Amino acid sequence: MPLTLVKPGEGRTVRKLGGPEDLKNRLLAMGFTVGSEVKVVSQFAGNLIVLVKDSRFAISREMANTILV
């Protein structure tokens, strides 16, 4: 399921990254690797704040839809 369906406060394991290569490379640089744990901290207007490897990131709904957990 895409990361956008995870409720705030829940954690999941990244299973697959989709989207174009440049987006995948950006996600990899942020720490979204297959097998890594990601926790949704909050959602606001469709955008998400997530915790990955002890770092918080704000990502758009479109970007979150390419992260499968």
Image: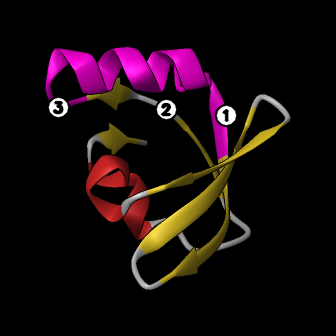
- Residue 7 in view of the camera: yes
Quadrant the C terminus occupies = top left
To which residue does mark 3 refer?
A: 19
Front in this rendered view, residue 5 or 53: 53
Q: Which residue is mark 1?
A: 37
Q: Please name the residue shown 45% across and 69% down the image.
A: 47
Does residue 35 appear anywhere in the picture? no
- Residue 25's tag is none
For the residue labelled by badge 3, is the local secondary structure a helix, a strand or a loop?
loop
Q: Position of residue 44 (x, y in %)?
A: 53, 82
- Circle 2 Cα neighbour tier, 10 Å, few/some/many (<14 / 14–19 / ≥20): some
Dividing the picture into quadrants, the one containing residue 23 is top left
Amino acid bearing label 3: Gly
| Residue 65 x, y percent position in the rendering | 28, 53
Residue plotted at (73% across, 69% down): 9
Residue 15 locus on image (x, y percent): 41, 28
The amino acid marked with disc number 2 is Val
| Image side of residue 68 versus residue 69, left or right | left
Instruction: Name the residue nearer the viewer: 40 or 22.
Output: 22
For residue 54, side relative to residue 63 (left or right) = right
* Among the two numbered marks 2 and 1 on one chain, the one whose residue lies closer to the N terminus: 2
Which residue, as the protein is rendered here, is positioned at the far left?
A: 20
Q: Quadrant of residue 29?
A: top right
